[in-house]
Image: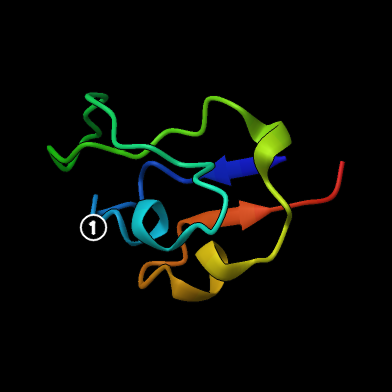
Amino acid sequence: MIYINEDLCKGCNICVELCPVQTYQKSTKINHKGVCVPEHPDDTKCVKCQLCTLSCPDQALTVEDD
């Protein structure tokens, strides 16, 4: 399961760019900071490599085993 903390996300989209299986995509959903928070419409594509969590400068992502 993928969790994005919208309060911490600054919309840098590093997760979108680095995901090897393209789990994330840019969205139009805006958080309280006024930035577009990425979305993950299909969690089943995630291989749990943790690259997104390691690369997120704001520690806004969590990937957990189901």
* Residue 23, image quadrant: top right
Specify whether 54 is left or right of 56.
Answer: right
Specify whether 54 is left or right of 62.
Answer: left
Residue 37 location (% of width, % of height): 31, 39
Residue 29 location (% of width, % of height): 27, 24
* Residue 54, image quadrant: bottom right
Direction front: furthest residue: 21
Label 1: element kind: loop
- Judging depth in this view, the residue of 39 and 45 nearest the camera is 45
Residue in the picture at 16% in, 43% down = 33
Residue in the picture at 66% in, 34% down = 43
Mark 1 packing: few (<14 Cα in 10 Å), some, or many (20+)? Answer: some
Specify whether 46 is left or right of 4.
Answer: right
Q: Is residue 37 above or below residue 30?
A: below
Q: Quadrant of the N terminus?
A: top right
Query: Total marks drawn?
Result: 1
Residue 51 location (% of width, % of height): 57, 69
Direction right: furthest residue: 66
Q: Is residue 38 above or below residue 49?
A: above
* Circle 1 residue: 12
- Judging depth in this view, the residue of 4 and 51 nearest the camera is 51
Residue in the picture at 33% in, 62% down = 14
| Model colouring | rainbow
Q: Is residue 1 above or below residue 61?
A: above
Residue in the picture at 41% in, 57% down = 15
Residue 21 location (% of width, % of height): 57, 50
Q: Quadrant of the C terminus?
A: top right
Residue type beneath disc 1: Cys
